[in-house]
Image: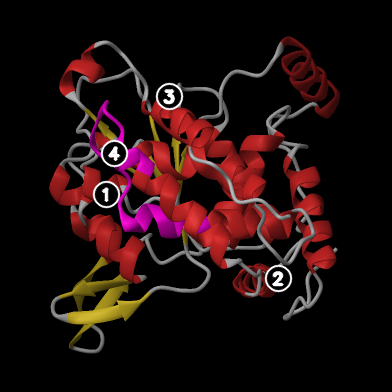
Amino acid sequence: MTAPTSIVAPADAARLVADVLDELERAVVGKRPVLELVLLGLIADGHVLLDDLPGVAKTLTARSLARVTGLDFSRIQFTPDLLPADITGATVFDAASGDFSFRPGPIFGHLVLGDEVNRAPAKTQAALLEAMQERQVTVDGTTHRLPRPFLVVATQNPIEHEGTYALPEAQLDRFLLRTRMGYPDAEAEAELLARRVARGTDEVELATVCSLEGVLALQEAVERVHVEPAVARYVVELARGTREDVEVEIGASPRGSLALLKLARAFALGRGRDFVDPDDVKAVALPALAHRIVLRSEVWVRGTPPESVVERVVATVPAPSWR
């Protein structure tokens, strides 16, 4: 199924989301909830951070999503010697014309994979900030708009610290959501091996079941998902709850509230609804808020994860009633 340029029915959007996920699962086995989150990041017009161990299909997920949705894919391998111009592009002298021209970098793609983003120093990481927030880059005083849609899927390995540079809070806050792939269960891993043997090759040939226009149509459909004032207030109370928790030094910012709202609208659309209910908000609160929380030092030393704060806030803040 390929989406038209304008999706008018949430049921059409839900079918397209299901079709994309079905095709993605041909490559990434047993990880449908994670695949759905990454797809929701795309249709909510946000960026995704995949924070997990090597070999659990982070890169494969990004590459497969670009293939299935018909988007241009580019990859940036972050290393300690990577320069900002290696990401954004540079103004170069063209000997043939005798003039200077701008040569775009790999950030000029619809879906950009920032692989091992924490291996580059802060100056290079900062080259992503303007692109992720403003959807543009400025080189030599000239601003260049990025294409639409534009999604950054960044990966990092949480267990390696040598030769890495922790992402600053300002950059973490630019990601709409953070999630982890996790190991597949035994059945899914056995199915993965069986498919590889039957295929006879490492590569999985995926069909394009959506188009660039279809992705833009999904993004437009998200903007038409209705949010009751009581549900919007519930989003605010959850974000405020993270700021007021006794274990938290810095809670989710208003950008976190906006991210939670956007992700909840995309989640509702994927379920075929044109309105957000409180359960949609609860379903995406962890990936939308946990990475925006800075714990107090004594709590962090004990190894308490930020996710536990979000879970506690969701459990204690009363959700609005539909009655």
User: Could one spot residue 72 in this view of the protein?
Assistant: no
- Image location (x, y in percent) of residue 307: 43, 28
Discs 2/4, front:
4
Type of residue at label 4? Answer: Glu
| Region rendered in magenta | 241-261
Residue type pointed to by label 3: Ser
Q: Mark 4 against mark 3, which lies toward the viewer?
A: 4
Give the mark, 2 or 4, whose residue is nearer the N terminus.
Answer: 2
- Residues 158 and 204: in front is 158
N-terminal of the pair, mark 3 or mark 1, is 1
Q: Position of residue 204 (x, y in %)?
A: 73, 38
Foreground residue among 181 and 274: 274
According to the picture, the residue beneath numbered tag 4 turns out to be: 244
Q: CA distance from mark 4 to mark 3?
A: 14 Å
The residue where tag 2 is placed is: 214
Q: Earlier in the sequence, mark 2 or mark 1?
A: 1
Q: Secondary structure at mark 4?
A: helix
Counting other residues with Cα less than 10 Å from the Cα at mark 2, is it few (<14), some (14-19), or many (20 or more)? many
Residue assigned mark 1: 171
